[in-house]
Structure formats: structure tokens, C-alpha cells
Amino acid sequence: MHEPAIGIEQIEAARQRIEGRLRRTPVVVSPSLSDIAGHPVHLKLEHHQITGSFKLRGATNAVLSLSDSQKKNGVVGVSTGNHGRGLAYAAREAGVKCIICMSSLVPQNKIDGIKAQGADVRIIGTSQDDAQIEVDRLVSEDGMTMLPPFDHPDIIAGQGTLGLELVEQVREAETAIIQVSGGGLISGAAAALKARNPAIRVIGVSMERGAAMYQCIKAGKPVHVEELSTLADSLGGGIGLDNEYTFAMVRDLVDEIVLVSETEIAAAIRHGYWLERQIIEGSGAVGIAAIMSGKVKPAGPSIVLLSGGNIDMKLHHRIISGEDVDVTGD
């Protein structure tokens, strides 16, 4: 296996940099999922993070790593919601101007959450690629610094701090089940996990609809994948045809990627609420879905990341009430 582009040294440095600025989120054992798996299943409650998702880790590390001149000109990013909220919060805390560009597929509750952190939100087109065009213009014309949602060393290192917590909180874990989208989270977490425990299996989970990293790994290179509506909206978007870091890191560090259906995601959201007493968004629920569906069958103790809880509460109510919710538009 190749040495990862972002390794344990950068991740340890990121932890020191962001310490005291966000939460070390708790871990609990799930009796119900443990019964399904036949082995202890631990849940990492990262949706209890300050901004409701893991994204604050990478955003905080990236903002704190900027030069004074970069901070003066401000930061800009493209987001499906949670990166934007994390970046807006981190920028506000550092006194840095922030603009977030988003596609029209992003739910209104996530747009409102970013605005509440003081960022300027711009809705551009129907995909992250469309929104990226406005980001590129702001970088070129206004001298702003782009902090992307995943393919950036400081973002990856910041997300990797979550991996350090996982291995410290559940030392006996043999499998880590982690969301995969653009790959910043699972790349950083896997680098940390495997540096501390080379034998641990890291399994990525995504949705069936528009699983970009899965399709790219299958193709052996970054490819265009159509962005589709899904309950796991935070996992939407491509990885970029010019991907520099996360494609190779996922290819080299992640043992397997599984996909879950919209029905399985909805069932996992319901399970999270009624049996775990946790309010989680679709992307945060995919690990639970993988266990419940039997698509991941851990051979020993495992840890499942609940990555975010920023779900529209009206949608959440419909799902937990048993309504057959269809966001696909098919």
C-alpha cells in the first residue's frame, strides 16, 4: 500500500490546531444493531458536533491554516450543505468573510443553516459543478481563497481527527463503517485508523443514487457521475475529474464500498430515532442502513459513524411516522 498523501503527522497537527474549538463527540453501544450484527456495534455520535456534522473539523483546520492575507480576502466554497455550515461557522469564529455557493438541489433547511452562521449564500445551477463556476470567478476576480468540501490537504487532515477519536474510543473495533462521498472524511479517517491499527477494516457506505466515488473506483479513475436527488443529499456531487487526493486515498485505504437504497436509508433514519433516540439525516444514517440490510456483516466489534443530523424536521417527521417518502422525482 502506498503512503497516503495526507498522513498521521498532518492529522495529529490538525488535532492540536483545532483543539478546544469543537467537540470530542461521544460513542455509545447500540444493543439493537449489536443483535443484528451478532457483535458489538458502537455508534459515533458526530451529529452532536457544534454545526451538526463532521464537516466542522476540516473547515476549522483549513481556516486556521490560512495566511493573514488569505484571511483578509475571505474564503469561498461549494457545498451540499454541511461543509458550507462548517466553513461558515469556522470563518465567523476567525473573523473571516465567507461566501458559500450551492446548487438548487440543496434542501432549504441547509441553506438557512448556513445563512444563520453569517455567510453569503449563492444558489447557482443544478449541480455542484455549476456552483463551482461561481467559486472560480470569485477566486479569480476577488482574490478569495477556495476551501473545497473534500479534496484539500487541510480539509482531509481535519476530518482525520475523527479517525483518531474512533480508534481511541473503541480500541477493540475491527471494522469502521464510514460515509463516502467526495472522500475527504473517509480518506482522513482511514489514514488515521490504519496508522494506529493497520488491521482494521474500513468500509465506505454511500447511496445507490449518484454514488460518485463508488463509480470512480469501479472505473479506476475519476469520472463524471450524474447528481441525483436522494435522502442522503449530503453525499451528492462528483469527486472532480482533476481530483488530487481523495480518489487515490480511498482507492488505497478503503477496503470496500457498499451502496444502500432510499428505502434502506429511510428505515435507518426511523431506526435511529425510535431505537437509538438519535435524529440523523439521510447521509448520517447510511452506516446503520448497511448493518440493518446485511450489506455489511462485521466479523467482530465495529463502529458506525453517524456523520450528520441536519435534516429538515418536517421530512424527518414524515419518515419516522412511516410515510413512504420519495425525494427522487422518478
Image (spheres, grey):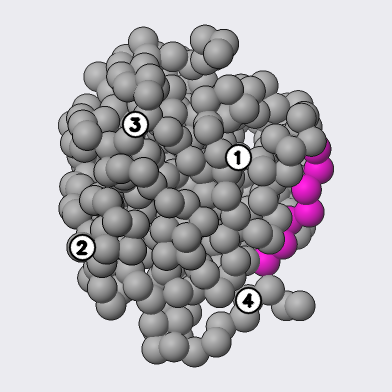
Q: Nearer the viewer, mark 4 or mark 3?
A: 3
User: Is mark 4 in CB contact (under 8 Å) with mark 3?
Assistant: no
Asked which quadrant contains residue 232, the reply is: bottom right
Q: Can you say whether 85 is above or below 208 in the image?
A: above
Pick whichever of labels 3 and 1 is earlier in the sequence: 3
Quadrant of the rendering where the N terminus is positioned: top right
- Give the labeled residue for mark 4: 327
Determine whether the residue tagged by mark 1 lies in a helix, strand or loop: loop
Q: Can you say whether 234 is above or below 168 in the image?
A: below
Q: Can you say whether 110 is above or below 325 in the image?
A: above
Q: Is residue 77 left or right of residue 54?
A: right
Q: Disc 2 to disc 3, how far (Cα)?
A: 23 Å
Q: Which residues are magenta?
A: 223-229
Q: Which mark is residue 31?
A: 2
Asked which quadrant contains residue 311, the reply is: bottom left
Determine whether the residue tagged by mark 2 lies in a helix, strand or loop: helix
Q: Disc 4 to disc 3, how far (Cα)?
A: 32 Å
The amino acid type found where label 1 is placed reads Gly
Q: Nearer the viewer, mark 2 or mark 3?
A: 2
Pick whichever of labels 4 and 3 is earlier in the sequence: 3
Pick whichever of labels 4 and 1 is earlier in the sequence: 1
| Relative image position of residue 127 (x, y in whole percent) | 73, 54
Q: Nearer the viewer, mark 1 or mark 2?
A: 2
Question: Is residue 217 visible to the viewer in this orientation of the structure?
Answer: yes
The amino acid type found where label 4 is placed reads Val
Q: Can you say whether 322 is above or below 119 in the image?
A: below
Determine whether the residue tagged by mark 4 lies in a helix, strand or loop: loop
| Relative image position of residue 257 (x, y in whole percent) | 57, 43
Q: Disc 2 to disc 4, how far (Cα)?
A: 31 Å
